[in-house]
């Protein structure tokens, strides 16, 4: 029965072990773009993980293209988020806390701390904006994924993919149908489906299993119950298995991937980093198979000394993701 309804069952411990030992690792565009939304520590850790496993990485042409097309938008959005928080604090200082007599329970030192936060945010805003014209992280991604990006489809293949995508989205076949724009057909790029199809084809051609990392938590990727993700959509697992001639795909959020990668690849990753990478609705039961991770000593914990990093940490998830987790959406092409 399990083989007939594979998508409805959690992978066994043996399957998980084999997958993490041999599978190719694929990152969705949103997972790559998240480096512009992390603090310095989390960003550096994520890049370090990718550098350590680059021999296992592969990127569909569609996801690579979405990363390039949406990179400037993501940088601009995060710069705006920093500026918005700075403005709110400045307005608070200028309009509400002009006089300590108005707020007698605020000490002068506390007011000065707010001024320092504004200064740190000012520096962070400038540094983030500089990424628009001088982006070392883009260069780092190019280095890590050198010779690891799939080929672009030709015109005939593009037309076939778009026709298939249109049929699937109109009939709510996952993944990607949540992005379908019924009122403006020309706006539909079918990015999720095209990337998904390229992943399946790669698995079939290379005869490899796949670990897919995404922070897209919409219903066209995940099965949910009582507000929690209980696993990928069964249709995705079943389709992948059938179309790749028996291969397996496991889908993880970035935080889940980092948590497991720490133990599997013996890479030091702090719980603080894993927690920051956890997007607002990243609660799930599917990927909580514990793997032993190396213990972390306090002396080994990276210290964040720059005002830029400190300012980023002032931005809680509600500020860095004002409308929910960052995903490829109607603003970011996908």
Image (cartoon, grey):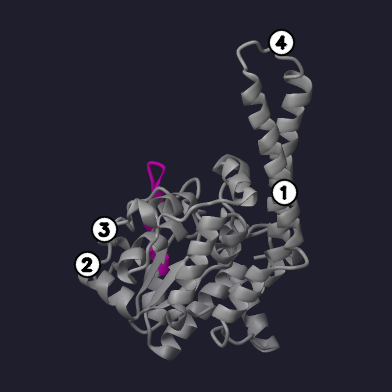
Mark linked to residue 102: 4
Q: Is residue 164 visible?
A: no
In the image, is residue 7 part of the stretch drawn in magenta? no
Q: Secondary structure at mark 2?
A: helix
Magenta stretch, residue numbers: 224-236
Question: What residue sits 42% from the left and 86% below the top?
Answer: 204
Q: Position of residue 282 (x, y in %)?
A: 44, 50
Q: Is residue 228 above or below residue 1?
A: above
Q: Is residue 40 above or below residue 200?
A: above
Looking at this view, is 198 or 86 the one in front? 86
**Gap in Å between the C-alphas at discs 3 and 1?**
40 Å
**Image side of residue 293 versus residue 141, left or right:** left
Q: Is residue 127 visible?
A: yes
Mark linked to residue 123: 1
Occupied quadrant, residue 333? bottom right
Q: Position of residue 54 (x, y in %)?
A: 47, 79
Q: Specify which label sits upstream in the sequence, 3 or 1.
A: 1
Q: Position of residue 179 (x, y in %)?
A: 62, 58
Mark 2 or mark 1, which is nearer to you? 1
Q: Which residue is mark 3?
A: 290
Question: What residue sits 64% from the left and 59% below the top?
Answer: 180
Looking at this view, is 130 or 149 the one in front? 130
| Contact flag, marks 3 and 1 (Cβ < 8 Å) | no
Q: What crowding class fits label 1: few (fewer than 14 Cα within 10 Å), some (14-19), or many (20 or more)?
A: some
Mark linked to residue 13: 2
Task: Give the quarter of the figure containing the N terminus.
Answer: bottom left
């Amino acid at each position: 029965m399990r083989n007939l309804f594979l998508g409805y069952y959690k992978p066994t411990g043996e399957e998980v072990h084999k997958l993490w030992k041999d599978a190719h690792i694929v990152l969705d565009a949103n997972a790559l773009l998240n480096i512009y939304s992390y603090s310095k520590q989390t960003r550096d850790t994520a890049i370090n993980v990718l550098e350590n496993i680059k021999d296992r990485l592969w990127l569909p042409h569609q996801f690579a293209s979405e990363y390039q097309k949406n990179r400037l938008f993501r940088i601009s959005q995060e710069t705006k988020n920093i500026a918005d928080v700075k403005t709110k604090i400045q307005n608070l200082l200028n309009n509400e806390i002009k006089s300590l007599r108005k707020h007698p329970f605020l000490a002068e030192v506390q007011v000065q701390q707010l001024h320092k936060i504004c200064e740190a945010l000012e520096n962070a805003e400038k540094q983030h904006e500089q990424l628009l014209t001088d982006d070392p992280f883009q260069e780092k991604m190019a280095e890590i994924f050198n010779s690891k990006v799939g080929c672009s489809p030709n015109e005939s293949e593009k037309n076939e993919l778009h026709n298939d995508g249109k049929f699937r989205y109109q009939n709510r076949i996952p993944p990607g149908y949540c992005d379908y724009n019924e009122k403006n057909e020309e706006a539909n790029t079918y990015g999720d489906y095209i990337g998904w199809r390229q992943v399946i084809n790669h698995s079939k051609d290379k005869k490899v299993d796949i670990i897919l990392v995404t922070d897209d938590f919409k219903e066209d990727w995940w099965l949910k119950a009582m507000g929690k993700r209980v696993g990928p959509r069964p249709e995705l697992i079943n389709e992948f298995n059938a179309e790749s001639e028996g291969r397996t795909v496991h889908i993880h959020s970035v935080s889940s991937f980092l948590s497991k990668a720490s133990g599997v690849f013996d890479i030091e990753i702090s719980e603080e980093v894993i927690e920051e990478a956890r997007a607002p609705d990243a609660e799930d039961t599917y990927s909580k198979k514990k793997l032993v991770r190396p213990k972390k000593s306090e002396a080994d914990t990276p210290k964040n000394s720059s005002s830029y990093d400190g300012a980023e940490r002032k931005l809680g998830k509600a500020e860095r993701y004002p409308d929910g987790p960052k995903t490829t959406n109607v603003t970011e092409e996908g």
